[in-house]
């Protein structure tokens, strides 16, 4: 896996979101949560070259978000399809107390 990269965006209404990009789970996600307090995280759940749904649920716990928007699933051969990956993300998010938004 590559170097962890992502960014936090804070809007005028003080809402902060965390966009994880194409990354895996890493411990400093806790620092992102502590410093920036995002409410929503856009997390890859493709499970190929990125974290999978279960790791994304752990990322929710580390970052401390209440909502996730799963992304990057079904984008490469061998990755889980939308319905399966989104269902796994919702189940994993419920276990950590985060809500999963999949559109």
Image (spheres, rainbow, N blue to C red):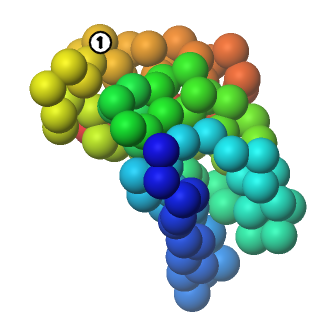
Splitting the image into 4 quarters, where does residue 12 fall? bottom right
How crowded is the residue under tag 1: few (<14 C-alpha within 10 Å), some, or many (20+)?
Answer: few
Q: Is residue 57 above or below residue 5?
A: above
User: What residue is rendered at 65% in x and 78% in y?
Assistant: 14
Q: Is residue 50 above or below residue 81?
A: below
Q: Position of residue 19 (x, y in %)?
A: 49, 61
Q: In the figure, is residue 69 to the left or right of 40?
A: left
Q: Quadrant of the C terminus?
A: top left
User: What residue is rendered at 34% in x and 20% in y?
Assistant: 85
Q: Is residue 4 visible?
A: yes
Q: In the figure, is residue 26 to the left or right of 101?
A: right
Q: Secondary structure at mark 1?
A: helix
Q: Position of residue 11 (x, y in %)?
A: 54, 81
Splitting the image into 4 quarters, where does residue 24 fall? top right
**Most foreground residue, 58 or 87:** 58
Q: How many numbered discs sit on the rendered protein?
A: 1
Extreme-bottom residue of the structure? 12
User: What residue is rendered at 68% in x and 45% in y?
Assistant: 26
Q: Is residue 15 above or below residue 22?
A: below
Splitting the image into 4 quarters, where does residue 7 fall? bottom right
Q: Is residue 86 above or below residue 2?
A: above
Q: Position of residue 52 (x, y in %)?
A: 46, 26
Q: In the figure, is residue 31 to the left or right of 54?
A: right
- Residue identifier under label 1: 84
């Amino acid at each position: 896996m590559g170097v962890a990269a992502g960014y936090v965006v804070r809007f005028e209404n003080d809402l902060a979101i965390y966009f994880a990009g194409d990354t895996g789970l890493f411990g400093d996600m806790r620092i992102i949560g502590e410093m920036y307090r995002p409410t929503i995280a856009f997390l890859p759940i493709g499970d190929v070259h990125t974290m999978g749904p279960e790791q994304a649920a752990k990322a929710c716990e580390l970052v401390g978000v209440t909502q996730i928007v799963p992304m990057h699933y079904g984008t490469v051969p061998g990755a889980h399809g939308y319905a399966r990956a989104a269902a796994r993300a919702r189940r994993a998010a419920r276990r950590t107390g985060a809500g999963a938004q999949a559109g």
